[in-house]
Amino acid sequence: MARFKTRTDRVLDICVWTAPALVSGLFLWLVGDLAVRGCGAFWPGESEASGFFRLTEPLELVIKFLTGAPERAGRSGGIGPILVSTGLILMVCMSMAIPFGLGTALLLSEFVAPQNRFGRIVRRSLDVLAGVPSIVFGLFGNAVFSQFLGLRFSILSGGLTLACMVLPLLIRSTEEALNAVCPTQRHAATALGFSRWATVFQIILPQATPGVVVGLVLGIGRALAETAALIFTSGYVDRMPRSVFDSGRSLSIHIYDLSMNVAGGNQNAYASALVLITVLALINAATNWLATRFLQREAGNF
Amino acid sequence: MCIPFQIRSYIALACLLSLFTCGCGAADGARTTAAPRQTQITITGASTIAPLMGEIGKRFEAEHPGIRVDVQTGGSSRGVADARNGLADIGMVSRDLKPDEADLQRFLIARDGVCIILHAENPVQSLSREQIISIYTGQTRNWKAVGGRDAPITVVNKAEGRSTLEVFATHFKINTKEIHADVVIGDNEQGVKTVAGNPLAIGYVSIGTAEVDREGGVPIRLLSLNEVEASVKNVRNGTFPMSRTLNLVTKTPPEGTIKELIDFASSSKVHDLVKELSFVPID
């Protein structure tokens, strides 16, 4: 009877409520700490301006920070070139990881039987790859892309290394999403005489889109947060990159360098971390919005 | 077959991205083959020197249009390895070269000196090597044991990963995990402020910072080590024991632009950059 709560029940109740409260508390603490310390960089110091102009000053400082080049080893100035490099690295990474990831996931879930030996080997190796520490990917990327393929320290070599790192995550989550599509849909499609590819494109992929998007967001998050895999591949140069063949510093490496190697770099490290978190949240929101929009469109078609 | 909109956009996106990547590749390939190799100088090595070298590189680029200086990190050993196998034109090494690295050309660009600081009101005038080790490993907890007043010692230590901590631990041969710290700080300024605000504190910071702050009236005392006064002058002439050299290394005697860059990095034109990162410029 639910009315008679024993002592154990109450203790368990408390535990179940405290755990999430602590987790969200920790998250809020972290974000709050970052926001308070990071915003310090955008707070105007002594200034001549008054009244309305005083109010627009933080905004100007934010824009200056987002577009300016780092100065004095990153202690002052902005993160413009670093944002561009980060964007390019992410683009290279995703343009490799999405087609390969989608293709492999489709093969695993639609074209080979669950007990198929080849499929099992692929899955097992992906699981092993997913657990490999990122520094190993960094050394691998340095040996293969930077040295063997002669890309040296470049955004391309960093993006490709990240793609290798993100692929297992992307494939497994996409495969889960594809498997979650109800099998009766496939049977119905077959009964109606759909070809295999028509079933994939018209029935399965549209339904699996939300799951694919979740995997994508996780992959982007992991790529953006990466330092170890990038320090030996895309490198440390904080100049504006001319192309993907130039070395470019990612946002995470910039934060790491400012907080560990540069005396007096803490202020800008916090500000950059705040930008990183904001970018992540924006990407998250954008992908979710796109997914829901596509789903509604799909619903309208039926 | 009708392909739904979202699938089409997946495909379009992929095509666009690969086109973009190829376009960049073609453009860059054409440029790099046309230009002589020396327009790009790659430097790898010690993460301590990397921020300094990055700034030096930018100033060098400004004086020599068309030349790019790419600075990468990875540690002193990596600097040595990359300079040897040709991955980098110049390596950065934040220590003296080992005997088996004598095949490389070495160029001193700056020194890094660390000194022990106390509050100016602390009656303790000097500490021996053993006393400092015993304070930092937590065996001595009271100033009375080393000739001060009867009060507990506040041990100020640097955060893991700071180069000053490395210099300090290497000099006293202390394992960084054995250090018993009451306060853990980040940069030099913070260290000076912590000690200046606590008459019972002991800490260590870069000599460059400490000297400037003491001259600016901050109440701290720089302790001598092995009878050698802690001063920028003594770090510069190499007599102060708790210091290290910041070097550039090359495999073969440098020529052309690389030689120009190395000369530039050890010239007085970059002394302000060296000082700003709390290192000691050489003459």
Image (cartoon, grey):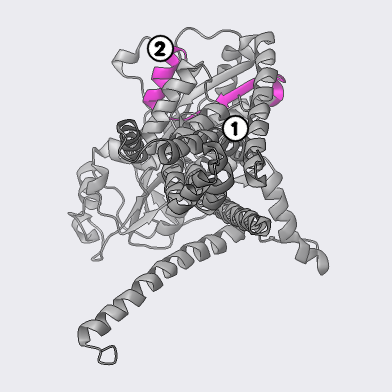
Q: Residues within 10 Å of mark 2 (few under 14, many from 20)?
A: some
What secondary structure is marked by label 1? helix
Is A20 placed above or below B44 here? Answer: below
Using the image as rendered, state which of residue A240 and residue A261 is in the foreground.
A240
On the image, the x and y values in percent for residue A35 come to 56, 62
Image quarter of the C terminus of chain A: bottom right
In the displayed structure image, the side of residue A300 where residue A49 appears, left or right: right
What secondary structure is marked by label 2? loop
Using the image as rendered, state which of residue B174 and residue B27 is in the foreground.
B27
In the displayed structure image, the side of residue B97 where residue A90 appears, left or right: right
In the displayed structure image, the side of residue B244 where residue A8 appears, left or right: left
Residue bounds of the magenta highlight: B62-86
Using the image as rendered, state which of residue B57 and residue A65 is in the foreground.
A65
The amino acid type, in three-letter code, at marker 1 is Glu
On the image, the x and y values in percent for residue B25 come to 64, 21
Q: Residues within 10 Å of mark 1 (few under 14, many from 20)?
A: many
Examine the structure image and report whether residue B75 is included in the region drawn in magenta.
yes
Examine the structure image and report whether residue B107 is included in the region drawn in magenta.
no
Could one spot residue B221 in this view of the protein?
A: yes
The residue wearing badge 1 is B55
Q: Residue at x 64, y 46 (%)?
A: B6
Is A193 placed above or below B154 here? Answer: above
Is B190 placed above or below B251 here? Answer: below
Asked if labels 1 and 2 share a chain, the reply is yes
Could one spot residue B246 in this view of the protein?
A: no
Chain holding disc 1: B
Most extreme residue toward the bottom, as rendered? A3
The residue wearing badge 2 is B104
